Image: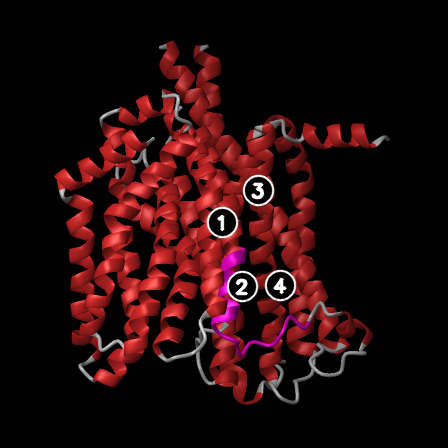
Amino acid sequence: MIALLLRDLKLAFRAGGGFGLGLAFFLIVTVLVPFSVGPQSSLLSTIAPGVLWLGALLACLLSLDRLLALDWEDGSLDLLATAPLPLEGVVTIKALAHWITTGLPLVLAAPVLGVLLNLPVPGYLWLVISLLIGTPALSVIGTFGAALTVGLKRGGLLLSLLVLPLYVPTLIFGAEVARRGAIGMETQTPLLMLAGITAATVALLPFASAAVLRINLR
Amino acid sequence: MIPDLGKYADTVLSAYAASILLLIALVVFSVLRGRKVRAEMEKVEQRMSRNG
Amino acid sequence: MSIATKANALWEYANPRKFLATSERVLPFFWITSAVCLFVGLIWGFFFTPDDYKQGSTVKIIYLHVPAALMAINCWLMMLAASLVWLVRRHHVSALAARAAAPIGIVMTLIALATGAIWGQPMWGTWWAWDPRLTSFLILFLFYLGYVALWEAIEDPDTAADLTSVLCLVGSVFAVLSRYAVNFWNQGLHQGASVMRAGAVTGADTEEKVSNIYFYPLLVCIVGFVLLFVALLLYRTGTEIRARRINALLARERING
């Protein structure tokens, strides 16, 4: 299991793909927002938590189609399916590798980009906490979407269409935690809901992803 | 014949028009596709029974 | 008849031939009754119900909005049930019925959204508000789109049926989750579901009831929409079965010669 995780991480580092690309995308989205809504700092600090959450979500989405596609193409997915490790474990590892290469860098970059958007000071802590708790759910849900579309020629757009509605609850609660934190309201309720969603998706969704992958590998 | 809809006439009429149009479109498309598929199936079945 | 034989009789319709023959027989009934109900209900509602003292004549939109919204949700539930049947019992008719239902659900969702927007313009002063109910319907619409897109994208019919079924199950969970999330996120403008409240029929609920004058034509319209849904569903499922048969025949033809 750990060997698989290390292999995935190594591949991601060498290809440079998920790692740099997601971060660059996040940066560009954040930089473009002031150009589109105007430079008033009061407006920017109001929308900063939501924009940062949306940027992180889209950056996450961007790297999903590579999550399983490469292994599918070179046939290593077939090997993994016949390996002693259950497929549920494989997809969990895949999601974890995706989170380490995409989600974690986004969490670390978010406070830096928050400066660009005049994020209020108490917001930084809550932004990082909400992203730290929320992004694993994004990776796991994304793995499910990637498993659904893995055999398709042009799966990328379809993947976004399938995954985005599934992201709605995570986005709502995650952005709500960051927003409330930024204006100094209590954040307990949305934070608990967010943690609940992450826990539930991490625990249950790998079964669906593995089932879907088995169908696709038939 | 048409009842007095007051100042909301446009609202009510456009809601009815939009909904009924959508419903009719759905039925028409379903029936058109159904007819096409049915005709094609008969064609294929006939060809099969002639050849096979 | 015992329950077991009854259940067996139900499963007989999972045989495509039997399904086609039976649906052919009952379809005219559903087409005609749905047309009659919709005609009567809409005419009754449109011409013979008084204006509401607050909403004026826009209250007449209820005869389209409420049944469409009901069917939009029920259609998804039906797809969920059909997906489960497909996953558990592998009846092809079931998977094809779920596929046939999705576009109906899309149109119903569109009608509910469109009539809602048109009604909202004079009543709330805006076409669109990010109200929980409206937002949930928009999300439901996205789920329908994704579901249909997945069906269209996959070539092998059994794989497509499997994958869309799993998507339908997972999507249902997330749709419910989104409903709660959206509720939490914004308390809305939309009135509660006033139609089905018991008070609406007995007249005991004074505050937000739909009174009997509006309720009976509305009931007829709902019945009409349900019948129309059944008719369309049976018809479209028949179409899907025939399309599958064409593909199967063509495949056999290719193998043989």
Q: How far apart are marks 4 and 2 (CA)?
A: 23 Å
Secondary structure, mark 1, is helix
User: Disc 1 vs disc 4: which is toward the camera?
Assistant: 1
Q: Can residue B14 be seen in this view?
A: no
- Do the CB atoms of the residues marked 3 and 2 lie less than 8 Å apart? no
Indicate the chain on which mark 4 is placed.
C
In the picture as drawn, the residue positioned furthest to the right comes out as: C1
Residue nearest the observer in this picture, C36 or C248: C248
Q: Is the N terminus of chain A in the top left, top right, bottom left or bottom right quadrant? A: top left
Marks 1/3 same chain: no
Q: Which mark is residue C180?
A: 2
Q: Which amino acid does label 3 sit on?
A: Tyr
Q: Percent x, y for residue C121?
A: 47, 81
Q: Percent x, y for residue A130?
A: 37, 63
Q: Which amino acid does label 4 sit on?
A: Pro
Compared with residue A188, is residue C228 higher up or lower down, i.e. above or below?
above
Q: What stretch is highlighted in magenta?
A: C176-194
Which residue is located at x 61 percent, y 67 percent? C66
Marks 1/4 same chain: no
Q: Which amino acid does label 1 sit on?
A: Ala
Circle 4: is it few (<14), some (14-19), or many (20+) Cα within 10 Å? many
Q: Quick check: is C184 in the magenta stretch? A: yes
- Do the CB atoms of the residues marked 3 and 4 lie less than 8 Å apart? no
Q: How far apart are marks 1 and 3 (CA)?
A: 39 Å
Circle 2: is it few (<14), some (14-19), or many (20+) Cα within 10 Å? some
Q: In the rendered image, which residue does mark 4 sit on?
A: C67
Question: Who comes first in sequence, dot 3 or dot 4?
Answer: 4
Left or right: B5 as drawn, with respect to A3: right
Q: In the rendered image, which residue does mark 1 sit on?
A: A200
